Image (spheres, rainbow, N blue to C red):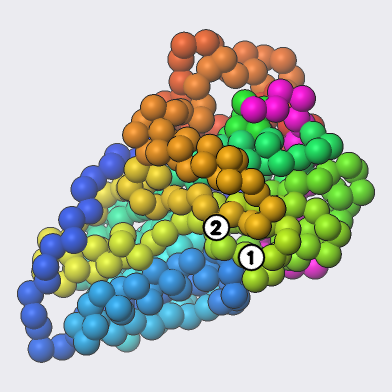
Amino acid sequence: MYKNLAATLVAACFLSFAVQAQTPTKSAEPIKAGFVYVSPITEAGWTRQHDEGRKAVEKALGDQVKTSFVADVPEGADAERVIRDLAQQGHQIIFTPSFGYMEPTLKVAKDFPNVKFESVTGFKTAANVAASNARYYEGRYLAGIAAGRMTKSNVAGYVAGFPIPEVLQGINAFTLGMRSVNPKAIVKVVWLNAWFDPPKEREAAMALFNQDVDVIAFHTGSTAVMAAAQERGKMAVAYHSDMRKTGPDAQIVAVTHQWGDYYTARVKAAMNGSWTSGSVWGGVKEGMIRVGDFGSKVPKKVQDEILAKQKQVGAGKLLPFAGPITDNEGREVVPAGQSLNDGQILGMNYLVQGVQGKISR
């Protein structure tokens, strides 16, 4: 997750590098891998997905690894203290999956040059700090297609955390996907200025449902929006995790991010000495983003359409940000025949046509 970022991301061009799951050499002592989480571990959501990644490391490496985690750590001074504690406890690799952990991670890394750090959703690197993130917007576009097929009111809602590029990418991709199959569709946005605040998330969802919204998406950390959709008899797109337990009737599809393979490969690299710093921005192609977990109300025809388009995204044949694209103030941002490059996507600072609302400042 990110905290306030602004246009500095424009300069943060993530250069993909191969993450090879090499076979580690056997050592007498297991490698210690630490994880820091920005919220509690709930049954679904951002932190749950990263903890599933940690468990995948344990499953893959068995007694060759010992993992530990600290949950519900606020971004800022508390994060620095926790990361430093993990390094002092002898962890050889530490994963810090929240944007607000980036600066604390870099600060601690300077004092522990022999420890490897993984800044997940950060963009700054150092000799012993790598950065990684997922192309969430690819899943958002596909979910938008599903929403466009399922809506009856042609009005969708979006409960958004902070107005930073990653969130804007998601709102815009969702809207473009929705309008690609339903040109009449509009998306109403509510800004929370919070990542994990279940009562606020629920309140925002309820307010949107009172404005003709019959399908809702969200970029927040809990299941509160899905629970609200279930309660009101509306439809929702799950984010981070499959949330059918929370919304068995509400969920139409889930956009999930998968960290197990990446985390395992990075721990193996730290074990066998092949770990290097760099930046990864992986999506459907790399298996880091997946759309599926369809709800029971979604017709097979729609499911098949989404899965087919997911293959096209993975093959690079379907680009969510291909022109023509106009922002919601009438300005052309992507001409026909062109598409946004990574730098432009990372620096996104506008809302596309079809989104009702403004960027919260």
* Residue 354 to residue 138: above or below: above
For mark 2, does the 10 Å Cα neighbourhood hold few (<14), some (14 to 19), or many (20 or more) residues? some
Residue drawn at point x = 60 percent, y = 19 percent: 325
The disc at residue 293 is 2
Residue drawn at point x = 37 percent, y = 46 percent: 282
Q: Is residue 182 magenta?
A: yes
Q: Position of residue 197 (x, y in %)?
A: 72, 66
* Residue 269 falls left or right of residue 103: left
Distance from label 1 to label 2 (Cα)? 8 Å
Q: Is residue 151 magenta?
A: no
* Residue 150 falls left or right of residue 61: right
Q: Badge 1 is on which residue?
A: 244
**In which quadrant of the rendered image does the N terminus lie?**
bottom right
Q: Which residues are magenta?
A: 181-201
For mark 1, does the 10 Å Cα neighbourhood hold few (<14), some (14 to 19), or many (20 or more) residues? many
- Asked if disc 1 and disc 2 are in contact, CB closer than 8 Å, the reply is yes
